[in-house]
Image (cartoon, rainbow, N blue to C red):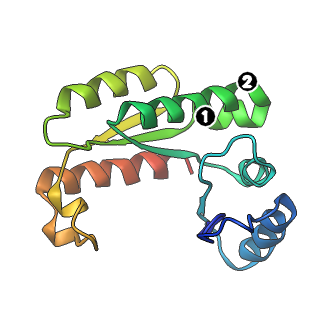
Amino acid sequence: MLRSDENDEGDHEISADEVDAVHTVAAKYYRMTIMDSGNTARAANWRAMIGHTNQLVIPTTTMEDRAEAAKLTLQTLAARDEHSAQLAENAVVIISQWKPEDGDEARRIADGFAPLVRRVVTVPYDQALKAGRIRHTALKPATQRAWLAAAAAVAEGL
C-alpha cells in the first residue's frame, strides 16, 4: 500500500513519476498492489495511480459531504477517458454508517450510487470500528458479513 501524503507538514507529495516507479517495482514482486489515493482527482499522482488501476474501490460514509465528494470523483472519472470511465462503471462503493441511526441515510446514499457503479455495499454502524485497532472478533456478525460482501464484490472485479 502506498500513501501519497503522510507528511504532516505537507511539503512532499509523491509525484506521478514516483507513482510510476513504485508501481513498476511493486508489480515485479507482487500480483496485487493497493494504493490509497486521497481522492485528489486533479493531482498528477492521482491520475498516474488511476492509470495503473484495474479495480477501483470508493469508500465513503453516511456523512453527506463525504458521499458527495465520492460521487464527484466517480463523475470526474466517467468523463475523463475510456479507461477511467470503465473504472468508474466497474467500481465498488463501500458506505460505512457513521452513526447508529444512519440506516435510512445509508440506503438513500446507496441508491444514489447504484446507477453509477457495478456494486454498492453498505456496512452497518459498529462501535468496534471506532475503537482504535479493528479486531475481527469484536465486530458484530452483521458487520462481518457486510465486509465479507464488500471483499467479494471487489474480488469479482479482479
**Closer to us: 76 or 43:** 43
Q: Which residue: 77% across, 55% down?
A: 45
The amino acid beneath tag 1 is: Thr
Q: For mark 1, does the 10 Å Cα neighbourhood hold few (<14), some (14 to 19), or many (20 or more) residues? A: some
Number of residues whose C-alpha sits closer than 10 Å to that of mark 2, classed few (under 14), some (14–19) or many (20 or more): few
The quadrant holding residue 13 is: bottom right
Residue mark closest to the camera, 1 vs 2: 1
Of callouts 1 and 2, the N-terminal one: 1
Residue at the (59%, 53%) spot, across then down: 38
Q: Who's the residue at 20% across and 34% down the image?
A: 102
Q: Which secondary structure, mark 1? A: helix
- Residue at position x 80%, y 30% in the image: 81
Horizontal arrangement in the rendering, residue 83 relative to residue 72 (left or right): right
In the drawing, what numbered circle is on residue 79?
Answer: 2
**Location of residue 63 with respect to 130 vertically, above or below:** above
Q: Which mark is residue 61?
A: none
Q: Which mark identifies residue 73?
A: 1
Q: Left or right: where does residue 94 sit relative to residue 26?
A: left
Image quadrant assignment for residue 135:
bottom left
Q: x, y percentage for residue 66?
A: 44, 37
Q: Is residue 150 above or below residue 12?
A: above
Q: Residue furthest right?
A: 17
